[in-house]
Image: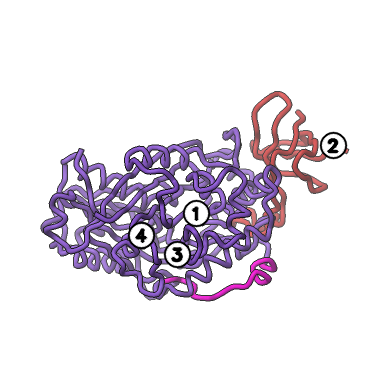
Amino acid sequence: MTGTIYTETVVYSPPEAFASEAPYQIAIVTLDDGGRMTSRILGERVSIDDRVELAESRDGVPFFRKIA
Amino acid sequence: MREVSVIGVGKTRFGAFPDRNLLSLAVEAGQKCLENGNIAPAQVDAFFLGNFAAPSFVGQNHLAPYVSSALGIRGVPATRVEAACASGGSAVYHAWAGVASGIYDTVLVVGVEKMTSQTTARVAEILASAGDCSGEIKAGATFPSLFAMIARRHMHQYGTTREQLAAVAVKNHANGALNPDAHMRKVVSLEQALAGKPVADPLTLYDCSLISDGAAAVVLAPTERARDLVQKPVRVCGIAQASDYLALDQKPDITSFPAVCAAARKAFAMAELTPDDIQFAEVHDCFTIAEIIALEDLGFVPRGEGGPVSASGATARDGVRPINPSGGLKAKGHPVGATGVAQVCDVVNQIRCQAGEMQLKRHSLGLTQNLGGSGGTSVVTFLGEI
């Protein structure tokens, strides 16, 4: 599954459940097949309009990474 | 439909009050309000309570009769209204509907939140429950991060800058310094605001509103009766509530809040007013970007102009149209359930010429805009002289 970054942010002040993971990047991805998904970003930080692909899903949360 | 007026207002100070519980805050605001409106508890026909998350913040449910009975109001409907950060505005809207329809004659609304007994991380978690918990929140989004993503997109589409966001914080802190009831009475420089600790890029601590305790109350009555009760009733010229998706990823364009646009459209139509008629406004600046978008959604400026206008001084207390002369959520504080009610109190005080150091020169017609979550609910109210 591939798509384009619609918007993104890096979270520095997380809720309790995510405290050990901060800072982490989340993004809304516009999917090539239509629709949008709020996702976590793995690896390199992304910016608006970057191309990304689905790397994995953890407990129903999609993790995308930048397409080199 | 009957015309409705605000006949009384009352507020606590906003801040962090470790020795005050939710009930004492709510009762203080309610009693001040009844006194201000010259109304005895036995005259109240119905009670609405705006509260977002007392079950999570303080472990208390069944909140409306808990508060109303402590105010000496018994035997009448007492109802809690929850619409995230628009809980207070929504409670005012439902009270208005009850009076306008003729079901009730005198309705008391109290908005309250007690937030500071929890850690910041726990508060972030409780606030996040106003988002879509099956999607964005599960992925690790917080409210600052949702508004950070909105800010990023607004910057991308319209060229809005960090300096323009910071200008909103600087202006609202300057206003808050004049407000004796504000949580933070501290002037902040542009340099300070720009150098704040990052919370969620591009937002820093200075872009975020405060975590506060506080309560606010208003009492409503039909305008035809209001003149006999108090010297200066303030007319509800227009009011509307609207709704939208919770999740940002469901919205076609996150740089605008359709619920705000819809509520503003309906309220302007009811009041037979245009944006140019509004002299000042209390808008929902939960984050600096939210005030910039509010200016656009309310029709005060064209799309994309919210940033430049905010940096121009036009929204300052001596500007063309002062925005958040109370200091807004940014400096006055944001006890979530109290906010929408407090906005009405602040506008009423301006119209009655009882705003003290905050008093504006032009103050006969003002607006409040209350936003729930990242746009799932909005309430827009116009208040004016009778």
**CA distance separating discs 1 and 3:** 29 Å
Q: Where is residue A7 in the image (x, y as percent from the top left)?
A: 69, 43
Q: Where is residue A61 in the image (x, y as percent from the top left)?
A: 66, 39
Residue bearing the label numbered 1? B126
**CA distance separating discs 4 and 2:** 52 Å
* Callout 4 and callout 2 share a chain: no
SS type, badge 1: helix
**Label 3 close to label 2 by CB (< 8 Å):** no
Q: Which of marks 3 and 2 is in front?
A: 3
Residue B290 belongs to the span the image colors magenta: no
Chain of the residue where label 3 is placed in the rendered structure: B
Q: What residue type is labelled 1?
A: Ile
**CA distance separating discs 3 and 2:** 48 Å
Residue bearing the label numbered 3? B325
Label whose residue precedes the other's in the sequence (1 or 3): 1
Q: In which quarter of the image is the C terminus of chain B?
A: bottom left
Residue stretch in magenta: B182-196
Residue bearing the label numbered 4? B347
**CA distance separating discs 4 and 3:** 9 Å
SS type, badge 4: helix
Residue B293 seen:
yes
Residue B191 belongs to the span the image colors magenta: yes
Q: Quadrant of the N terminus of chain B?
A: top left
Q: In this view, does B368 lie to the left or right of A15?
A: left
Q: Which amino acid does label 4 sit on?
A: Val
